[in-house]
């Protein structure tokens, strides 16, 4: 069994794919270094990340593939699937052989697997743009928590940087402990540790209480349809909704954020292909 291991970055994955295609043989699996070390009988070949070679390889792919194909590759990389690396490698190998028409082979399992994951990532990012709930902190910044299935911060950050460019905000992926932070000019993705609940501004606490009361008072018990509600808004997105009791912050306690620049992840500033609203 041929296994490649890499550092988990997008540049590292590009180096893995370039190494495999130059040898005319794809590996059976591509995994990150830490995961490969945990496997008892793993004999993974460690592929070092070469940023210059990765940029050159990405430029080569841009010259050979359609923008929709490149966008699919980036969105699959952001997915939470443990098989995302080998799915990307197989898709890229097929697309390079098929040329610009690769996306039309939707019945091919390599294309279908890539586009299924890309659509899932794009769909979740699209939903979260409408479900995200910002709350004003005591220091004037706006803070929102999410627990997505996929790593959608690189898709959410440029959208809200355009939409809310007149204020500073933090979008916190509490499951992965990463955050997109916007200072009013540029945004970046950093590792983040939260020691306590955020301290909300007084106005935010009052507004949240009024909104929860309004949400409860307008509800008509006789017309409740929990099944339809779950269909329109999956339950996994309810955790941080302000209008629900479970989504309400406690006013007590302070929050301290210690941020360190994220390592082993895609560059904070995404390529133009990742700025599209959804996967084509």
Image: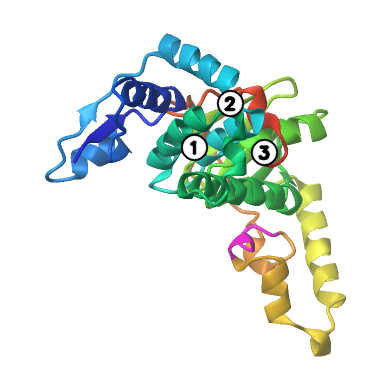
Q: Give the alpha-carbon distance from disc 1 to disc 2, as whole Å.
A: 17 Å
Dots 3, 1 in contact, CB < 8 A: no
Dots 2, 3 in contact, CB < 8 A: no
Front label number (1 vs 2): 2
Quarter of the image containing the C terminus?
top right
> Relative to 34, is 197 above or below?
below
Mark 2, residue position? 65
- The percent position of residue 267, horizontal first and vertical second, equals 53, 23
- The percent position of residue 183, horizontal first and vertical second, equals 70, 24
Label 2: few (<14), some or many (≥20) within 10 Å?
some
Residue 216 quadrant? bottom right
- The percent position of residue 77, horizontal first and vertical second, equals 49, 37
Q: Residue 77 — which label?
A: 1
Can residue 278 be seen in the rendering of this structure? yes
> Relative to 143, is 274 above or below?
above
Mark 3, residue position? 156
Residue 36 quadrant? top left
User: Going from the N terminus, do you reach mark 1 or mark 2 first?
Assistant: 2
Tell me what residue is drawn at x 69 percent, y 60 percent: 241
Q: How many marks?
A: 3
Element carrying mark 3: helix
The residue range painted magenta reads 236-241
Q: Give the alpha-carbon distance from disc 2 to disc 3, as whole Å.
A: 25 Å
User: Going from the N terminus, do you reach mark 3 or mark 1 first?
Assistant: 1
Tell me what residue is drawn at x 87 percent, y 75 percent: 218
Q: Is 274 situated left or right of 24 in this image? A: right
Front label number (2 vs 3): 2
Label 3: few (<14), some or many (≥20) within 10 Å?
some
Is residue 86 one of those drawn in magenta?
Answer: no
């Amino acid at each position: 069994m041929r296994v490649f291991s890499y550092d988990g970055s997008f540049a590292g994955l590009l180096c893995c794919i370039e190494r495999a295609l130059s040898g005319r043989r794809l590996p059976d699996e591509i995994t990150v270094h830490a995961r490969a070390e945990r496997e008892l009988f793993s004999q993974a070949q460690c592929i070092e990340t070469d940023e210059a070679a990765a940029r050159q390889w990405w430029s080569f792919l841009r010259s050979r593939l359609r923008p929709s194909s490149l966008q699919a590759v980036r969105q699959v990389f952001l997915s939470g699937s443990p098989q995302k690396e080998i799915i990307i490698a197989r898709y890229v190998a097929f697309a390079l052989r098929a040329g610009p028409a690769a996306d039309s082979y939707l019945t091919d399992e390599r294309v279908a697997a890539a586009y299924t994951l890309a659509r899932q990532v794009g769909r979740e990012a699209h939903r979260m743009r409408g479900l995200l709930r910002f709350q004003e902190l005591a220091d004037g910044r706006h803070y929102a928590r999410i627990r997505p299935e996929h790593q959608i911060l690189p898709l959410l950050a440029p959208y809200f940087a355009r939409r809310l460019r007149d204020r500073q905000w933090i979008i916190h992926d509490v499951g992965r402990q990463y955050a997109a932070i916007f200072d009013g000019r540029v945004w970046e993705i950093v590792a983040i540790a939260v020691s306590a609940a955020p301290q909300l501004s007084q106005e935010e606490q009052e507004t949240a209480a009024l909104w929860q009361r309004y949400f409860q008072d307008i509800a008509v018990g006789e017309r409740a349809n929990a099944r339809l509600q779950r269909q329109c808004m999956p339950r996994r997105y309810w955790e941080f909704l302000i209008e629900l009791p479970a989504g309400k912050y406690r006013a007590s306690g302070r929050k301290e954020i210690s941020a360190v620049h994220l390592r082993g992840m895609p560059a904070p500033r995404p390529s133009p292909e990742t700025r599209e609203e959804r996967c084509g």
